[in-house]
Image (cartoon, rainbow, N blue to C red):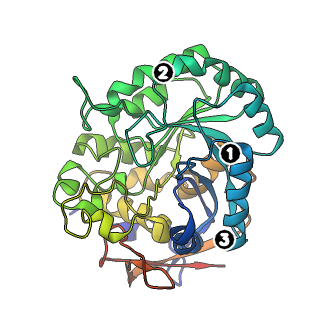
Amino acid sequence: MASTAQEWLPWSDDGFLTLPASFDAHVHLRDGAMMRAVTRTIRQGGADAVYVMPNLVPPITTVQLALDYQKRLQELEPNVKFLMSLYLHESMTPEVIKDAKREGISGVKSYPAGVTTNSSSGVVDYASFYPVFAEMERQDLVLNLHGEMPSGKDVTILNAEEKFLPTLLELHTRFPSLRIVLEHCTTAAAVEAVKSCGPKVVGTITAHHLSLIVDDFAGDSYNYCKPVPKTPEDRHALLSAAVSGNYKFFLGTDSAPHPAIAKRGGPDGNAKHAAGVFTQPYATQYVLDAFEMAVEKGFLDASQLKRIDFADFLSQFGRDFYREPRSKRRIRVAREKTERLLSIVSNDGDIEVVVFRRGEMTRRLEWL
């Protein structure tokens, strides 16, 4: 009989697991009404600091736009620290990077043109940005890579990440002191590529990719995201990396809210389905649930989990990479699954956002 999470999680006598607040190194908080609806769910999912993606419409391409966005977010949730990023765009120069460093911007996000939500203004030719990357290296700003090649010729959504990996390795070779994040790793090849690089290159792993494989999104548009989930072998590589205790891998949920109607293909169902899985309200619980599932189904051995500190993947490694102090705030997660995963609705009722694993049960999370 397979081991269960009840055996390897260090539950207290009263049935709780206590952890430092999580750090989510990849969030989409949108703007306007959607921003107001989802920003309040960050602490609900156990995080007190997040790294914010810049792919708004229009994208966050200047320091002032980033600071204005940060102010809007901070006003909505003063108990969360928002680390801001810029969108890598043809208008970016080394002078912008210097200004970003002075104003406390943490990094720059690269989207290959057209690969995901609001990426039409993204990168076509990385070589044209070499002067920008050189300045980022000097200023110690982070380069966040959406690691997929655009579809076409021999590239599909299933191999787009693996086709991108030579670009990662080339950038690391040219700029060895540049801190680089390969965002939302989904393949065993991506995990190995990150491991093969020097200490400046790391990878984030989402909560949902720890659970999903390609079959799961093929029949459920709410599980459709970019990059798409891959094979069982790839999922096993992600789970193994997440519990390895290797500082190179940490949580970045890529929580991506869309109105439920957009996930269903529009009012008549004939439009394209929006790519993105919404996990923010239960981010910490989803990770623990994924580990439990992996043990119960035999994907991981319980002995692997007895040796690790869950705070490393959920909180510490990400903060360390971004040079953020470790959180003194504490959360606790209940042993029993008593809370139903519920979608969120905006205050005016106009926006519904469906959560990952909607309707299933998870653990209650409390702040101490």
**Front one among 29 and 232:** 29
Q: How many marks?
A: 3
Residue receiving disc 3: 330
For the residue carrying disc 3, how many other residues have a C-alpha within 10 Å: few (<14), some (14-19), or many (20+)?
Answer: some
Q: CA distance from mark 3 to mark 2?
A: 44 Å
Q: Earlier in the sequence, mark 3 or mark 2?
A: 2
The reply to whether dot 2 and dot 1 touch (C-beta < 8 Å) is no
Residue 170, label in figure: none
Residue at horizontal 54 percent and vertical 52 percent from the top: 56
Q: Earlier in the sequence, mark 2 or mark 1?
A: 2
Residue 125, label in figure: 2
Helix, strand or loop at label 2? It is loop
Tell me: 299 left or right of 243: left
The answer to which image quadrant residue 198 occupies is top right
Whether 247 is drawn above or below 264: the answer is above
For the residue carrying disc 2, how many other residues have a C-alpha within 10 Å: few (<14), some (14-19), or many (20+)?
Answer: few
Q: Is residue 45 visible?
A: no
For the residue carrying disc 1, how many other residues have a C-alpha within 10 Å: few (<14), some (14-19), or many (20+)?
Answer: few
Q: Nearer the viewer, mark 2 or mark 1?
A: 2
Tell me: 28 left or right of 304: right
Where the C terminus falls, by quadrant?
bottom right
**Front one among 314 and 91:** 91
Where the N terminus falls, by quadrant?
bottom left
**Front one among 336 and 210:** 210
Residue 227 in the image: x percent, y percent?
Answer: 35, 44
Q: CA distance from mark 2 to mark 1?
A: 31 Å
The answer to which image quadrant residue 327 occupies is bottom right
Residue at horizontal 39 percent and vertical 26 percent from the top: 164
Q: Amino acid at mark 2?
A: Asp
Q: Nearer the viewer, mark 3 or mark 2?
A: 2
Whether 162 is drawn above or below 15: the answer is above
Tell me: 135 left or right of 180: right
